[in-house]
Amino acid sequence: MRLRFSLFILCAVVLPGLPSVAQMSYAEESAVLPDINRRFVNPDFDVWAGRFERPGREVYDRREDIVKATGAMRGMTVADVGAGTGLFTRLFSGAVGSAGKVYAVDISQVFVDNILRISREQGQANVIGVVNTRRSVSLPDRSVDLVFISDTYHHFEYPQDMMLSIRAALKPGGSVVVVDFRKIPGVSSAWVMGHVRPNEAVVVEEIESAGFKLAEDNDLLRTNYFLRFVPAPVKK
């Protein structure tokens, strides 16, 4: 180890001492990959569950290890951003227990509705569904201890705006864990090279430019990286 998103649609409120979006963004952000999420407007949930929750997919095979590495504990509030079919939402629900809660955040109403259905069927009353927007995670300010983003950062159409909204949603002492595909020429698959926009270095640069600093680079995974970010001190 090397240290180094439909129940809530809320307007952003600036945290005391935290620069506003206007102060931290120099101009209206343009979409880096417009319409990359079009296929999730009305997805077939069962088809995507078969793709996301299958043996051979690293984040599925190592799901328990990943959740443990995030440090999620009883009583915490976790946001699973880009929750998809709810694989990690369900695991975090168990990790935080009845005293905690998990926001299942996704831009797809279909995904969120089905996550809530399955969670209720499994008795997980601590799961809250959130249909977010393309620019925001649509969470209350200072509401979460941990934001978890698995194989989703590369789907952010407005990464700067998204990360600013995530920073506002973090409680003091909170952190963001990003798990995404390693993009290495000659090593990564052709699908990754053609589908994934940013490599790890670009992800770090973009997130740090939104007011975070890299706190942990964990070598837990092989085809994915595991990075933890915390809010950087506000410059006065």
Image: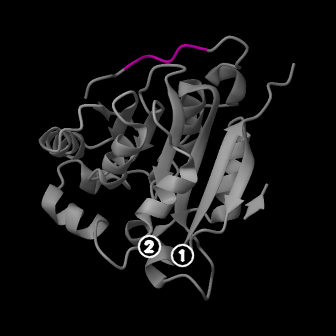
Q: Is residue 133 magenta?
A: no
Question: Disc 2 designates what residue?
Answer: 58
Question: Disc 1 designates what residue?
Answer: 223
Task: Give whichever of 168, 176 is nearer the camera.
Answer: 176
Q: Principal SS element in the magenta part?
A: loop
Q: CA distance from mark 1 to mark 2?
A: 7 Å
Quarter residue 22 falls in: top right
The residue under the point 39% across, 27% down is 99
Regarding mark 2 in the picture, which secondary structure is present there? helix
Q: In the rendered view, would you say 188 is above or below 29?
A: below
The residue under the point 48% across, 32% down is 76
Marks 1 & 2, CB-CB < 8 Å contact: yes
Q: What span is colored magenta in the figure?
A: 10-14
Q: Quadrant of the N terminus?
A: bottom right
Say whether residue 194 is left or right of residue 54: right
Q: Residues within 10 Å of mark 1 (few under 14, many from 20)?
A: some
Amino acid bearing label 1: Thr
Task: Give whichever of 55, 150 is nearer the camera.
Answer: 55
Q: Position of residue 77 (x, y in %)?
A: 45, 31
The residue under the point 53% across, 51% down is 32
Say whether residue 208 is left or right of residue 82: right
Q: Position of residue 29 (x, y in %)?
A: 57, 37
Q: In the rendered view, would you say 104 is above or below 165?
A: below
Mark 1 or 2, nearer chain start: 2
